Amino acid sequence: MKVSFHYDIEKFRLRDSRIIKKIINRIVTDARLRPGIIDVIVTGDEKLYEINREFLGHNYYTDIITFNYNEAGTVNGEIYISAERVRENSVKFNVTFGSEMRRVIFHGLLHLCGYDDRTEGEKNKISEMEEMYLALSYAE
């Protein structure tokens, strides 16, 4: 799987991208899908807000937007993440920034693999999976 990280924020880089890539591959494998191309774009609140309005018609800030380009069982997509929103949520949930960033990335990948979070049951399932992959990422 080709996973690339792109940064819209000056002097910002994920220090643990190697581990994140490993877990991304695991998520795709566990879903019994083929790895393709994933771009993770870390940006700011305003950029994500613009994307949310333009492409989804939503008028609010969010931490992540995922664009699914899957083809015939091959996982391809773009994951846009607001570093500002992730930082705010890490404080709100009393977790480290790095941990919240991993959780959000894994959440996006789970969406690309076909998992949804529209119902309460789906939300619980995707949260459980996020926690499992987060724990695995720290075991690496």
Image (spheres, rainbow, N blue to C red):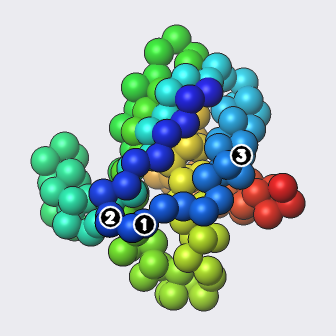
Corner quadrant of residue 96: bottom right
In x, y percent, where is residue 50? 16, 57
**What is the distance, in whole Å, between disc 3 and disc 2 at their CAs?**
24 Å
Which one is in front, 17 or 74? Answer: 17
Answer left or right for 116 relative to 103. Answer: left
Please give the name of the residue rendered at 65% of the width and 44% of the height, measured from the top-left corner.
Answer: 21
**What is the distance, in whole Å, between disc 3 and disc 1 at their CAs?**
21 Å
Please give the name of the residue rendered at 58% of the width and 43% of the height, measured from the top-left corner.
Answer: 110
- Mark 2 burial class by Cα count in 10 Å: few <14, some 14-19, many 20+: few
Answer left or right for 30 relative to 63. Answer: right
Corner quadrant of residue 64: bottom left
- The quarter in which the C terminus is drawn is bottom right
Mark 3 or mark 2, earlier in chain:
2
Corner quadrant of residue 32: top right
Residue under label 1, please give it: 12
Task: Identify the amino acid type marked 1.
Answer: Phe
Which one is in front, 43 or 61? Answer: 43
Mark 3 or mark 1, earlier in chain:
1
Q: Nearer the viewer, mark 3 or mark 1?
A: 1
Q: Which mark identifies residue 23?
A: 3
Task: Identify the amino acid type marked 3.
Answer: Ile
In x, y percent, where is residue 116? 52, 45
Residue under label 2, please give it: 9
**What is the distance, in whole Å, between disc 2 and disc 1 at their CAs?**
6 Å
